[in-house]
Image (spheres, rainbow, N blue to C red):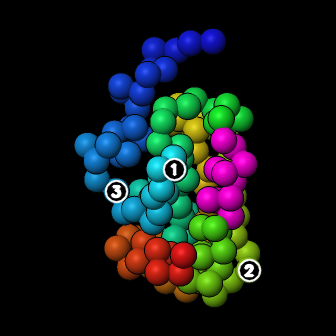
């Protein structure tokens, strides 16, 4: 199945990975990129995406490594925001690029819109 943005040219997440659109980076390796969501559910709400344009999470070639990155960031969120309760969502209809939302419950302390501080908290805990 193909779609008009299968190459990622018009994909907002591909533009974030390339630096064309700024983001508050939490984590990056050769295959994956994690950044704070611009409409956070709670402090530290993070999007974890493959760097290469892949439409669905289930089509990420190294999906096991992908979930290990998600786990690593969730553990850092637990430590950073002093909670065991980290939520995750995989829906995929909002942006046509594979992504996993992970975020602390909404009872954690902190300002969800303090992007620099929240990114630093998570990055430092990795």
- Marks 2 and 1, Cα distance to the nearest angstrom? 24 Å
Q: Is residue 2 above or below residue 125?
A: above
Mostly what secondary structure, the magenta segment? helix
- In the image as oriented, which residue stretches furthest toward the left? 20
Residue identified by numbered label 2: 84
SS of the residue under disc 1? strand
- Marks 1 and 3, Cα distance to the nearest angstrom? 14 Å
Residue identified by numbered label 1: 32
* Percent position of residue 96, x then y: 53, 31
Q: Residue at x 64, y 50 (%)?
A: 66
| Label 1 neighbour load within 10 Å: few <14, some 14-19, many 20+ | some
Q: Is residue 84 left or right of residue 114?
A: right
Provide the residue span drawn in magenta.
Answer: 62-71
User: How many numbered circles are shown?
Assistant: 3
- The quadrant in which the C terminus is found is bottom right
Q: Residue at x 65, y 35 (%)?
A: 61
Q: Which of these two is toward me, 106 or 61?
A: 61
Q: Residue at x 62, y 59 (%)?
A: 69
* Percent position of residue 100, x then y: 62, 50
- Marks 3 and 2, Cα distance to the nearest angstrom? 26 Å
Q: Residue 79 colored magenta?
A: no
Residue identified by numbered label 3: 23
Q: Is residue 17 left or right of residue 83?
A: left
């Amino acid at each position: 199945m193909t779609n008009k943005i299968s190459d990622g040219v018009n994909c907002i997440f591909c533009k974030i990975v390339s630096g064309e659109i700024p983001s508050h980076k939490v984590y990056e390796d050769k295959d994956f990129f994690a950044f704070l969501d611009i409409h956070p559910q709670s402090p530290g709400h993070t999007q974890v995406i493959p760097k290469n344009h892949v439409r669905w999470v289930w089509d990420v070639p190294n999906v096991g490594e992908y979930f290990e990155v998600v786990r690593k960031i969730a553990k850092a969120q637990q430590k950073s925001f002093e909670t065991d309760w980290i939520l995750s969502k995989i829906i995929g209809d909002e942006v046509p690029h594979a992504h996993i939302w992970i975020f602390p419950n909404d009872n954690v302390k902190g300002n969800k819109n303090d992007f620099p501080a929240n990114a630093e908290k998570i990055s430092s805990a990795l």
